[in-house]
């Protein structure tokens, strides 16, 4: 910086240098410092340019923009010297700035803490109506359309009448959950539906917790409200004769429905897997289907019978693209649900006559059960059936274990024969060790 230090004529201890070119107002810009004695030594500390302004709050509480002047520099110097005299407060400009930084940091911490408290209080007051639309948006982005539609229906019919849009999440208690449960059971809803509804409430709370919308307890997890016990597993499967009757009648009704049912019976594929099947995933030479993005989130291979392979060859158009659907719906779009023709045909041939338990009714999924059941009855190991069905857990396949009892009985008889057979020396292997004398 050019220029010499100039002592202020009006304020002892204040001096400045003039900028050689820059103006501040009508005169040259000034760079101000203060100098004073501290512990027997002269100390000089820089303040800054007169032209550099900053915002501060004045004595009257008003926010003003200020810059350094000789008068302000003298006032600061007087403050520091007074602090030296009384032995209290910052004695240097560096100490004053450090103290100001500490105050600023403390104020910022207090502000952030106050904001956190306010946000926490706001989160505690969030209502079901505040979070449900956001949960639906999350579901639409991450779940299948049918799942989202079911969640909306259950929320509208069973949750919303009890946990209203204005109900704060923190006020939801076991009372609300028990009321939902009682209303559903009184209306004759299946225990599985009750469990599904309570699980939906739990999922909404989990979603809120993960996304910082609510930090209280999850009433479903925290409470002792239990969904009624149930076993909704469908155990009904078709015999060979029943399957033949169904397919023969479907030939008269709809070849598309017939072919879809035949493919499920001969491959164990689910309805959604068949509806999404494209010709590019049909290997005619090896009689293998590639089922993509199945229910458990994985892609698997399905092995089909010669009968199903012949059906697919007859269906295949002369000119077809790999992405074309094997069973296109109207306008070439993917089918969303099995035709009502299936249900009407089942009723016509009396497959559900005299059966009051819904678990015993023939539905489209019964065809997949029939596929698995026939495999087990013909001695196929449960683990192999598990892989062919695409089950992640062998416990899901274990429902068919009783169907292989005859096979296991035959195996036991073979073992009995082996243990009771004569050895080469003409001796019989004892089934129990002889007691020592």
Image (cartoon, rainbow, N blue to C red):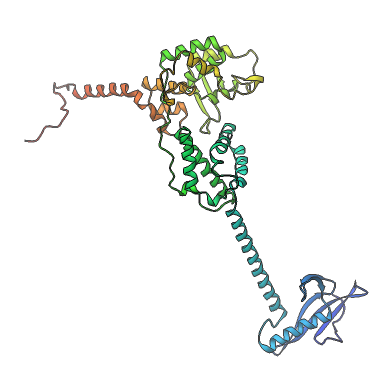
Left or right: 418, with 258 as reference point: left
Q: Position of residue 244 (x, y in %)?
A: 45, 12
Q: Foreground: 167 or 352?
A: 167
Name the quarter where the C terminus is drawn.
Answer: top left
Which image quadrant for residue 155? top right
Name the quarter where the N terminus is drawn.
Answer: bottom right
Q: Position of residue 357 (x, y in %)?
A: 41, 25
Q: Foreground: 137 or 187?
A: 187
Indicate whether 63 appears above or below 43.
above
Indicate whether 300 appears above or below 94.
above
Left or right: 88, with 393 as reference point: right
Indicate whether 289 appears above or below 39.
above
Most extreme residue toward the right is: 26
Q: Foreground: 350 or 188?
A: 188
Which image quadrant for residue 398? top left
Q: Position of residue 14 (x, y in %)?
A: 81, 83
Indicate whether 210 appears above or below 10.
above
Q: Which residue sits at x=54%, y=47%?
A: 205
Most extreme residue toward the left is: 437
Q: Position of residue 339 (x, y in %)?
A: 56, 19
Q: Is residue 285 visible to the viewer in this orientation of the structure?
A: no
Q: How many marks?
A: 0
Q: Which residue sits at x=66%, y=85%?
A: 88
Q: Is residue 222 visible to the viewer in this orientation of the structure?
A: yes
Left or right: 111, with 197 as reference point: right
């Amino acid at each position: 910086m050019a220029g010499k230090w100039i002592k202020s004529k009006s304020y002892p201890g204040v001096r400045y240098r003039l900028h050689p070119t820059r103006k501040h107002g009508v005169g040259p810009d000034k760079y101000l410092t203060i100098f004073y004695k501290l512990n027997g030594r002269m100390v000089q500390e820089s303040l800054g340019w007169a032209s550099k302004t900053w915002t501060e709050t004045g004595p009257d509480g008003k926010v003003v923009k200020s810059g350094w002047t000789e008068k302000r520099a003298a006032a600061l110097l007087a403050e520091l010297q007074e602090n030296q005299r009384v032995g209290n407060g910052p004695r240097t400009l560096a100490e004053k700035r450090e103290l100001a930084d500490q105050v600023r940091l403390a104020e910022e911490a207090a502000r952030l803490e106050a904001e956190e408290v306010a946000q926490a209080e706001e989160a505690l007051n969030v209502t079901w109506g505040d979070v449900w639309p956001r949960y639906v948006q999350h579901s639409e982005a991450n779940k299948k359309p049918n799942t989202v539609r079911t969640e909306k229906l259950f929320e509208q019919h069973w949750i919303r009448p009890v946990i209203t849009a204005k109900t704060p999440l923190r006020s939801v208690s076991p009372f609300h959950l028990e009321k939902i449960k009682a209303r559903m059971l009184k209306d004759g809803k299946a225990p599985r539906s009750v469990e599904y509804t309570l699980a939906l409430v739990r999922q909404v709370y989990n979603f809120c917790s993960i996304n910082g919308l609510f930090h209280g307890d999850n009433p479903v997890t925290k409470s002792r409200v239990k969904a009624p016990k149930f076993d909704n597993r469908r155990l009904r499967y078709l015999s060979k004769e029943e399957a033949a009757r169904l397919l023969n009648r479907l030939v008269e009704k709809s070849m598309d429905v017939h072919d879809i049912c035949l493919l499920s019976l001969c491959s164990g594929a689910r309805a959604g897997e068949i509806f999404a099947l494209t010709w590019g995933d049909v290997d005619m030479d090896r009689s293998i289907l590639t089922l993509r993005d199945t229910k458990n989130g994985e892609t698997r291979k399905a092995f089909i019978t010669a009968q199903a392979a012949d059906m697919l060859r007859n269906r295949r158009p002369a000119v077809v693209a790999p992405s074309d659907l094997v069973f296109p719906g109207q306008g070439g779009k993917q089918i969303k649900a099995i035709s009502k023709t299936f249900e009407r045909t089942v009723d016509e041939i009396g497959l559900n006559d005299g059966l009051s338990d819904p678990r015993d009714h023939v539905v489209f999924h019964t065809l997949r059960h029939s596929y698995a059941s026939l495999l087990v009855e013909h001695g196929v190991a449960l683990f192999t059936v598990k892989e062919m069905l695409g089950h992640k857990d062998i416990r899901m396949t274990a429902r068919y274990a009783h169907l292989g009892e005859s096979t296991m009985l035959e195996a036991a008889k073979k073992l009995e024969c082996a243990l009771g057979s004569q050895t080469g020396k003409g001796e019989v292997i004892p089934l129990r060790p002889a007691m020592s004398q």
